[in-house]
Image: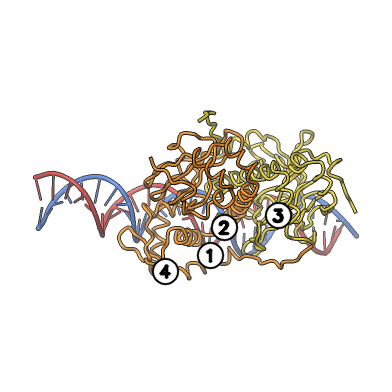
Chain colours: A orange, B yellow, C red, D blue
Amino acid sequence: MVHISCNTCPTDACLIKQYCSPQWLNIVDQKKYQTFFSPNLNVFTEISPVLGIYFIQSGIVKILLTGINDKKQIVRFAQKGHFFGHRGSKDEIYGISAVSMEDSLICFLENNILRNMFRENQDFAIGLMMYYSQELRKMENRLKNISQMNIREKIAEALVLLWDTFGSNSKKEINVFHIRDVITNIAGTNIQQVSRQLSDFEIEGLISRGGKKISILNIARLRTIIQKYNQLIILENRSI
Amino acid sequence: MVHISCNTCPTDACLIKQYCSPQWLNIVDQKKYQTFFSPNLNVFTEISPVLGIYFIQSGIVKILLTGINDKKQIVRFAQKGHFFGHRGSKDEIYGISAVSMEDSLICFLENNILRNMFRENQDFAIGLMMYYSQELRKMENRLKNISQMNIREKIAEALVLLWDTFGSNSKKEINVFHIRDVITNIAGTNIQQVSRQLSDFEIEGLISRGGKKISILNIARLRTIIQKYNQLIILENRSI
DNA sequence: CGTGCTTTTGAATAGTATCAAGGCCGGTGG
DNA sequence: CCACCGGCCTTGATACTATTCAAAAGCACG
């Protein structure tokens, strides 16, 4: 059984580490379930207790919803320090699931412990609130994008998202299993369109395809394709 | 200048009323900005302080993002007791705006007051966290729907959403200004398609069109059109 | 009863999905 | 070592769906 203690855990982005008292870190250590997932395992059906929150020590997890005819929609990737799976006080969810994309160490806490944590570590509750509020904002923007982009742009956005999630400085190749299916489920289209569009992007010199792998050659130009959809409005900082 | 005190405010759904101490209700009363909006006014550019949170005493507000060529995407409606406009600690937003749909009384609180409220009213922070987490879940589902539904289904969903937001028991007519544009911006299509689809729905006896107004004749059958996209999975309530 | 705006409808066009065939690649076993 | 097999990938042809353009009809207001 794996167990990385919160005290020695190197995942500084974790809100629990950031905002909870040392005593509470110890409590979390005792109460959390920590499970290792090799790639392509369903997180939600793997850890037994279901009423609580999941957070990631290391690795990457895709959060997806299943629609008609088993068609998947990937809504986001969660990684180091991110939270997912919290479903409020009700026992209901919309067919959501979480699947590991690489070797991942996932922590889980039950709701009743979480509730006490909130009370005694207010900054943690605030931090988590901010986290959800920011995720909500991102999701709203993504809703707009999925609704307004054409296929070319949706696939460009999928590639950028994959690059930002799985890319590394050292190599251009994106190391994701069945990457065309993943792109399909991010962009909300079918695999043939993905294939066609990748072909176009290769001709344009933005990517290259070696066997089943995809390498990003020009991330900057991919970003410009979708730039106009993601322009931030920077507000002046006025007080009162 | 309108001012409804939190103590006498009848909006019980408001998390502030629900979870904050009597002392804090008084502080909020003094510090909140409360503004009346007649229909079709932009809330975000009307209240002067911009770093904080908005919540609704009465009325309905549409939350929308503006895309290319000024194309709008309505992401949700906020009403009595709902929160919106919170943008975390950064001064950045993605072109989001809020527009009143009917006579609305909107309250606003600055971030620094909010922060202190969180610390001294933990249940409020927790409640707001739950609120955002649930909104996030809804938005993820809507992302899937927008991505996978065809036009007919998207427009049915828009009608159901409008009915649930603006409908009343007493009359079948949905009283929304420029309702075809609103449907267009919810469903993410164009007004001609909306017109065609409304025409079909009228032939099928689901709605009727009197002048520019739309009445819902058979909300149940409209719901069945989109039912398969919104099926809840009810989980067994297991402990540990 | 115009005038200007919104709505509806038709027709043409563009965009996307589906179907089907062939190609490529890695693995396996003769 | 090579032939074959199965799974994935690519591409073309076709069907379908959605968007755009344009014109006519309807409605509200003076």
Q: Position of residue A87 (x, y in %)?
A: 57, 39
Chain under numbered label 1: A
Classed neighbour count for the residue bearing mark 3: other residues with Cα under 10 Å, few (<14), some (14–19), many (≥20): many
Asked if the residue under mark 3 is in contact with the one under mark 4, i.e. CB atoms within 8 Å, the reply is no
Question: Dot 3: what SS?
Answer: loop
Q: Amino acid at mark 4?
A: Leu
Q: Are marks 1 and 2 in contact (CB under 8 Å)?
A: yes
What crowding class fits label 4: few (fewer than 14 Cα within 10 Å), some (14-19), or many (20 or more)? some
Distance from Cα at disc 3 to Cα at disc 2: 20 Å
Q: CA distance from mark 3 to mark 1?
A: 25 Å
What's under tag 1, amino acid-wise? Answer: Ile
Seen in the picture, residue B61 relative to B234 is either above or below; the reply is below
Circles 3 and 2: CB distance less than 8 Å? no
Whether residue B200 is visible, yes or no, is: no
Near-viewer residue (A122 or B26): A122
* Secondary-structure class at tag 2: helix
Q: Residues within 10 Å of mark 1 (few under 14, many from 20)?
A: some
Q: Residue B157 appears in which quarter of the rendering?
A: top right
Precedes in sequence: disc 1 or disc 2: 2
Read off the residue under disc 3.
B85
Which image quarter holds the C terminus of chain A? bottom right
> Where does label 1 land, which residue?
A226
Q: Marks 1 and 2, Cα distance to the nearest angstrom?
A: 9 Å
Dot 2, crowdedness within 10 Å: few (<14), some or many (≥20)? Answer: many
A64 to B189, vertically: above or below: above
Judge from the rendering whether residue A2 lies leftward or rightward of residue A53; answer left or right. left
* Residue designated by label 4: A206
Q: Under tag 4, what secondary structure?
A: loop
